[in-house]
Image (cartoon, rainbow, N blue to C red):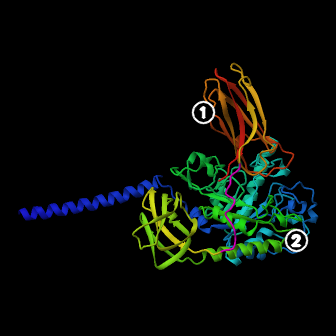
Amino acid sequence: MAESKTNKFIMNRKQVLFVCCIFVAWFSCADVVNGQIPLPSPAQLHWQQKERMMFLCLDPATWQGREYDDHSCPIEQIHLSAINTDQWCEVARSWGAKTILFVAKHTGGFCWWQTQTSEYSIRNTPWKNGKGDVLKDLSESCRKYGLELGIYVYPGDDLWGAGIGSGGITKDPDKQEAYNKVFRQQMTEVLTQYGSVREVWFDGSCHISVADLLQKYAPDAVIFQGPSATLRWVGNEDGIAPDPNWYTLSSKDLATGVATALHSDMNGDAYAPVEVDVPLLKHGGHKWFWAPGTDSLLLTDEELMTLYYKSVGRGSVLLLNATPDTSGLIPASHVARYKAFGEELASRFDVPVKRVSGRGDVIELTFSKPTELNHTIIQEDLSKGQRVMEYVTEYSTDGGKAWTVLYRGSSVGHKKIDRFPTVRARKMRVRFTKSKATPEIVKFAVYDVKSALLDMNNESGEQAVVIGNWEGTTFDETEWKELTLDLTPYVTKIGQYEIHFQMLIHDSGRRSSDDPDDLEFKDLRLEMYGQDRRIDLEQVNRTTFRIVRSQQTLDEFKTILRMQVKRKSHRSSGDIVIRRITY
């Protein structure tokens, strides 16, 4: 009887233990589902695994030698004498791009497909007697070459008075309802007539309601900017992602539709990775559209490798631009540059010295003899979320008795590429020293890269520039004073900028290490693209303001920051500085 009770007791303990294990497993899954580790949607996961994409920018601006269409080119001059969308796909594949994102309509309103919404479209050009459809040709070429298709349709349209940065809002409110119908029809056309679309780009956000169309016609697509955004702009057009690169942020920030990498929060409750867009014509310049005599702007082989390390190598998706000329072909000089880029990537990373996958806090590789190594690649299983928060890579020359640190990192995500001086190792390992849950690693690989390219040499950031100053009597204690800062000479590139009131001296004896808490600010206003852009202005803290320039504007547009300022009882003096944020 006693033995029977004992066996029953033991069996009950086993049952309890089993139930507890099930409960713990369920509770862990519930934590993930309930937001402690936000998970990507199937569309986001699919998109991140593509890694490299090719932007394709063609517009009447190409015939004008401009970045924005000013309608100075008669539509009958837009004749694509040699266009070959197969060539575009061949170029994309030459450097490993898996998707082509086509600018089907830019700010000027010209449409490259057979639309009934606008006379300013391909059907009124001499190409194929007005019967041509570039978007149709491209979609068929993409299927032929095993590429996916993404579509950029600018939410605004100059012809409707919804210009640069408008998000589709017309200057004349009486035109808004009519334009909303036009834009919704355009979105319906491009999403229903050309096969599966895997990415939709709303440059500078979208203020016209199209969420229903996206859900109905593009359920497998990721969305760049706008209220339905599932991706974020990195915040620059330099080809550089931040390090660390967190895919999560607060759902509140994501809902703005214009969140960037600066809104990343490794403990955020929403999942939205960043995309890194960069033009090929960026060596000493910045052009998204082809123009004569621009070969000098082609990124060098070294610059292309550098941006690869700083985009894909930091866990982002690289969106590298291509610019067909007025014949419709990507120029031969560009084709050669892409091909060399693809060959360099293949020679570096196609064949690792050794690779392994695994689960846990330590992943280790062993070599049969001392082996030269200078790169590692780590990849997480993102279907389980971005879990790694800190890691250390180490090597051993004596079989594991002693270890030497090679690299300390934080985020991993889809892919983290680390490079270091060549070592001779018998063992290599990565230790995950901090993580949200057990690391799930689909790839830990080591490489011995041999290359003549001198890349990754431009590590310096941009310096702050003094644009103004204040003294003890500049601002009043009792009345607000208008302060106007002309930022036009400084905000010359796409990106994010910080304006900081930097105290130099305070009448209480405090020095420059303290913030000027004697200053108060209100009624902040930003003029950019020739319009009120308060939406692109944020007060980061008491004395720092951030502006986002996402559109490449024309010279005649000024950037003006205005605010009301008042001081408290103490007096101070200092500088007002601006700097472009770099990663």
Q: Residue at x 43, y 58 (%)?
A: 437
Inspect this view and state whether residue 351 appears.
yes
Q: Nearer the viewer, residue 566 or 187?
A: 566
Magenta stretch, main secondary structure, is loop
Q: Quadrant of residue 115?
A: bottom right
Q: Which residue is mark 1?
A: 514
Q: Residue at x 63, y 53 (%)?
A: 228
Residue density around tag 2, few if under 14, some if 14–19, many if 20 or more, within 10 Å: some
CA–CA distance in space, label 2 to label 1: 59 Å
Q: Which residue is mark 2?
A: 327
Magenta segment, which residues?
Answer: 451-462
Where residue 211 sits in the image (x, y, percent)?
65, 53
Q: Residue at x 37, y 58 (%)?
A: 26
- Mark 2 and mark 1 residues within 8 Å of each other at the beta carbon: no
Where residue 241 sits in the image (x, y, percent)?
64, 57
Where residue 288 sits in the image (x, y, percent)?
79, 60
Q: Nearer the viewer, mark 2 or mark 1?
A: 1
Where residue 564 sits in the image (x, y, percent)?
72, 28
| First reached walking from the N terminus: tag 2 or tag 1 | 2
User: For the image shown, how many numbered marks are present on the structure?
Assistant: 2
Most extreme residue toward the left is 1
Most extreme residue toward the top is 478
